[in-house]
Image: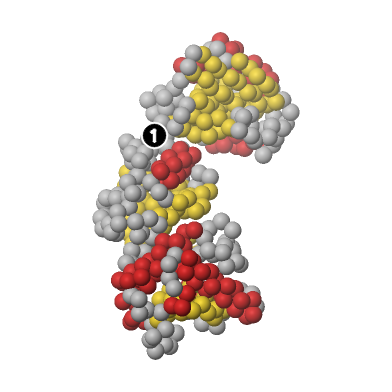
Amino acid sequence: MSIRALCLGLCVAFSTLLSTPLDAAASPHPSYLAFLPSVMTLRTPEYEDWDEYQIPQSPWEATSPGTLRHGKHWHLLGSVNDNSTDNAATWASLRKGFLAAGWSELKIYPNGGYAIVLHFKKENTEAWTWVTIGQPHTAWIDTVELSPVPLSFTLPAPAPKPEKIVRNADFSYLPALPIAGTKRGSEGPDASPFRVSIPGQDEPELVATGSYTKTYHPPANLSNYEWINVYRDALMKAGWTIVNAVRTELIVAHYGKNGRNIWTYMHMNVDGYSITVGDEGESDDALKSDLAKQYHVPLLGVLFDFNKATLRPESDAVLERVRDLLDKDKTLNVEVQGHTDDVGTAPYNLALSDARAASVVAWLTQHGVAPGRLSPKGYGLTMPIADNKTDEGRAKNRRVEIADMACKPNKM
């Protein structure tokens, strides 16, 4: 975005805002900005405990680690109390206050608008400010005081046996951030198949038969950036794998230890954040029971790289369950079946399903299952179990199944 476009946007936003005096109680006001109310009428103050902001922020300065500032973030908009007729004069009125408070003026960007970079350093305090003059008398001020993330958060590891989900209580292994003022929102189960987006895949992949969602409304001083960084670090320390993360918006993570196969989709929006969990808690005994009743069982969560037969590491938890099943029942021999959706030609899908079934057999034999107990076979697009016209249907059809070779095949 050019500074001219940014300034025009600020002017429009400024003209529609109600006048709201700066509230120091609602927005902790640093001493090095204490002069502002004496020279400006400040409106809609915003404060976040920890955020990332680029300073300088202009089309002439490339984004780099050196321009990304992390810390307490103040976001201020106001009108300057003077009679200036141009941007330079408006800045001159503000400049006196900044310099008197100990700030250094590093650079001015006058073209296409008017923007200024300022730096403050005194003892153990360092801060950066980006000022944009939107029109005469109007200024947008973003200040970042450098600081480490203020929140320390530890997640408990999921137990070997699936935990009971309790209404009006956190997930035992994925609680809300411990921030005062956080309120509970809606929650409930969803019986539809749980699908998640995985980098490199054209469509979401099916990983669980259902899910449960809990929502939270944190206070305004929690930034999206703090939210995603704190949860991402805590998940990794607790043994989760971050499968996908979109900056400040969502996290897709998987837990495949202690016999568990748990997926979570965490999303932040303007109203708060949600935590959705899909937990395929079946044991190998349940897998054996389903196999005996149905002859063939889909292995949810066995995932491959896009258009390849390369198993993704998140598949290990499911395949370990199959290995344990075969280890307990030495009489059980299975056909490992590969199935695809109808995207692409029939010969291509047949070859792909053959290769994927062979990859699963290779994983099982590498983990101790005798090769003679496994038979890989690809069926391509010939045995759909859902409508290929929808994303959800195609996700169901892209699957690996195991079939008991001693059973009489049921109609599939």
Q: How is the image coloured?
A: secondary structure
- Residue at horizontal 40%, vertical 57%? 256
Q: Is residue 134 left or right of residue 379?
A: right
Callout count = 1
From this view, report whether residue 224 is shown above or below residue 360. Answer: above
Residue furthest top in the image: 100
User: With 388 as the anchor, is 185 left or right in this view?
Assistant: left
Q: Which image quarter: residue 380? A: bottom right
Residue 318: % across, % down: 41, 65
> Residue beneath label 1, please?
151
Foreground residue among 343 and 240: 240
- Residue at the extreme right: 111
161 sits left or right of 26 in the view:
left
| Image quadrant in which the N terminus is located | top right
- Front residue of 92 and 270: 270
Question: Is 109 placed above or below 231 here?
Answer: above
Q: What element carries label 1?
A: loop
Q: Can residue 206 be seen in this view?
A: no
Judge whether 358 appears above or below 35 on screen: below
Q: Which residue is drawn at 61% across and 15% down?
A: 104
- Observer-nearest of 88 and 74: 74
Three-letter amino acid code at the position of disc 1: Leu
The local crowd at label 1, few if under 14, some if 14 to 19, many if 20 or more residues have their Cα within 10 Å, is few
- Residue 12 at what x, y percent from top left? 60, 37
The quadrant of the rendering that contains the C terminus is bottom left
Q: In this view, does 352 lie to the left or right of 71?
A: right
Q: Residue at x 50, y 47 (%)?
A: 249
Residue 168 can be seen, yes or no: yes
Residue 382 position in % (x across, y down): 55, 83
Instruction: Report the residue at 30% width, 54% height from top.
Output: 159
Q: Where residue 243 sits in the image (x, y, percent)? A: 49, 53
